[in-house]
Image (cartoon, rainbow, N blue to C red):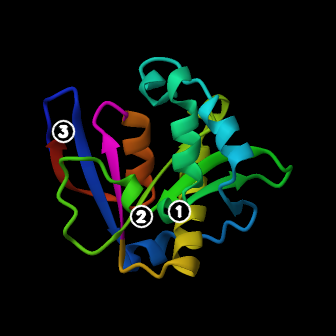
């Protein structure tokens, strides 16, 4: 295990397709759509309670965040449930990396967020498994990687549940 004793530390976790194949279930109930400005606008309005409030978008940064979400090279997707509700977003690629980490190993970086009112209810693992399936169909990665803030124990727990293993700890720059 990776041990870290700095509050602003960050973990990089990895999972190979072999490990993933043993755990994956088909998650056809979720729909992934390329991010558009309307969805991005809804997502940047999400407000998380402390300590997760660091993920909230400051009102002065809304336009920049929306622009980032809809920039195609960043590969952001909105995630919808069967009722047609926007419940999460996922990012596939370089925009899921955090400055200071070592990203030389071949892997698809994945990041994202769950709508605040749905956090802590067990949806995270299902969304992440659906994201694995989506990524395998669309990007054919050799492995997956997620970078998670050390304080975010909920996200670290979900990552471990779906098969990620710690591979690195660092202080983000």
Q: Which of 53 and 132 lies nearest the eye of the viewer?
A: 53
Residue at position x 42%, y 64% in the image: 93
Horizontal side of residue 116 vs 98, given as left or right: right
Q: Which residue is mark 3?
A: 173
User: Circle 2 — which element?
Assistant: loop
Q: Position of residue 102 (x, y in %)?
A: 17, 58
Residue 91 in sight? yes
Horizontal side of residue 47 vs 110, given as left or right: right
* Residue 148 lies in the magenta-colored region: yes
Q: Which of 128 and 31 lies nearest the eye of the viewer?
A: 31
The earlier-in-sequence mark between 2 and 1 is 1
As displayed, is residue 8 above or below residue 161?
above
* Residue 102 lies in the magenta-colored region: no
Whole-angstrom CA distance, mark 3 to mark 2, is 19 Å
Horizontal side of residue 86 vs 105, given as left or right: right
Q: Which residue is mark 1?
A: 75
The earlier-in-sequence mark between 3 and 1 is 1
The earlier-in-sequence mark between 3 and 2 is 2
**Residue stretch in magenta:** 144-152
Q: Which residue is mark 2?
A: 93
As displayed, is residue 39 above or below residue 50?
below
Whole-angstrom CA distance, mark 2 to mark 1, is 7 Å
User: Circle 3 — which element?
Assistant: loop
Residue at position x 52%, y 18% in the image: 49
Q: Residues within 10 Å of mark 2 (few under 14, many from 20)?
A: some
Q: Residues within 10 Å of mark 1 (few under 14, many from 20)?
A: some
Residue at position x 60%, y 70% in the image: 25
As displayed, is residue 55 above or below residue 93?
above
């Amino acid at each position: 295990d990776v041990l870290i004793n700095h509050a602003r530390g960050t973990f990089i976790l990895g999972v190979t397709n072999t490990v993933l194949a043993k755990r994956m279930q088909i998650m056809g109930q979720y729909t992934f759509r390329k991010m558009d400005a309307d969805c991005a606008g809804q997502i940047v309005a999400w407000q998380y309670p402390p300590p997760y409030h660091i993920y909230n978008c400051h009102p002065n940064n809304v336009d920049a965040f929306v622009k980032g979400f809809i920039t195609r090279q960043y590969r952001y997707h909105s995630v919808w449930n069967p009722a047609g509700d926007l419940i999460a977003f996922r990012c596939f690629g370089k925009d899921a990396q955090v400055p200071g980490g070592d990203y030389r190993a071949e892997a698809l970086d994945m990041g994202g967020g769950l709508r605040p009112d749905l956090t802590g209810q067990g949806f995270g693992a299902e969304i992440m498994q659906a994201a694995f399936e989506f990524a395998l169909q669309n990007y054919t990665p050799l492995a997956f990687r997620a970078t998670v803030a050390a304080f975010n124990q909920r996200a670290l727990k979900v990552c471990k549940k779906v098969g990620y293993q710690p591979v690195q700890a660092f202080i983000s720059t």
